[in-house]
Image (spheres, grey):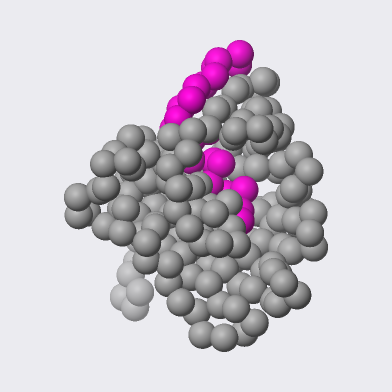
Amino acid sequence: MAGAGPRRIERVAAEVWNPIAVELLSASVTAVLWQASDGGSEVCVLERAGRGWRLRGTVLTHEAKQPIELRYAVTVDSAWATTDVEVLVALAGGDARELNELGRLWSGTERPPEYSDCVDVDLSFTPATNTLPIRRLGLDIGEEAEIHVAWLVWPEFSVQRIPQRYTRLAKDRYRYTQDEFEAELAVDEQGLVLQYEGLWRAIATA
């Protein structure tokens, strides 16, 4: 900034440190650390991605006494409809491999007919993807909706089209139902899960 006059410096400083701008910047990224009931953990970040949003996270878990690392990124448009999915898995410290079957559903090529009505993806190893229908549906308290999702089954890593139901119980609470399974979810103002009945709980947020 060599050669800039005092007024120029003051104006630039005011723009950089404008409290409203700082607040908007900090509001564009939200992070949560989850503890799983089976001893695993996960850090998840919700961030702006163009006109939409991206959920990305790293899951540390185990299966058959083997340590497992899962990394994912789910991108949505401004209406919270899924546009891209990436999932990487590394078993027992080995090289990460990408789960291409799921990603192909959002690759831009023609989707198999049985998935034509799946707007959302559900990664069963994380509570992060519950945020997608919660934000997209925009239910009022007392309302419910049934949807079909592309569900990545853990630990088999197979993909299925399944029905799910969301019911908004209160400003910050939902009931999630899939087949015979049912759980109550407590969420923050961004729709990220703070408590997933019996499975996950947030132990730190930012």
Residue drawn at (75%, 56%) of the image: 36
Across and down, in percent, residue 204 comes to 74, 54
Residue extending farthest bottom? 94
Decide if residue 2 is on the left or right side of residue 36: left
Q: Where is residue 91 in the image (x, y as percent from the top left)?
A: 60, 78
| Among the 4 quarters of the image, the one containing residue 131 | top right
Task: Quadrant for residue 149, please give it.
Answer: top left
Measured as percent of width and height from the top left, residue 41 is found at: 72, 63
- Asked if residue 70 shows in the view, the reply is yes
Q: Which of 203 and 71 is in front in this view?
A: 71
Q: Is residue 139 left or right of residue 98?
A: right
Q: Where is residue 74 in the image (x, y as percent from the top left)?
A: 43, 54
Location of the N terminus (image quadrant): bottom left
Range covered by the magenta-colored residues? 125-147
The residue depicted at 76 percent of the width and 57 percent of the height is 35
Residue 11 shows in this picture = no
Above or below — where is 61 with respect to 79? Answer: below
Q: Which of 14 and 138 is in front in this view?
A: 138
Residue placed farthest to the top in the image?
A: 142
Eyeballing the image, is 181 above or below 51?
above
Was residue 158 drawn as part of the magenta stretch in this picture?
no
Q: Is residue 203 above or below residue 174?
A: below
Residue at 60% across, 33% down: 179
Residue at 48%, 39% (x, y): give it: 162
Q: Would residue 5 appear left or right of 136 to someone viewing this image?
A: left
Which is nearer the eye, 12 or 52? 52
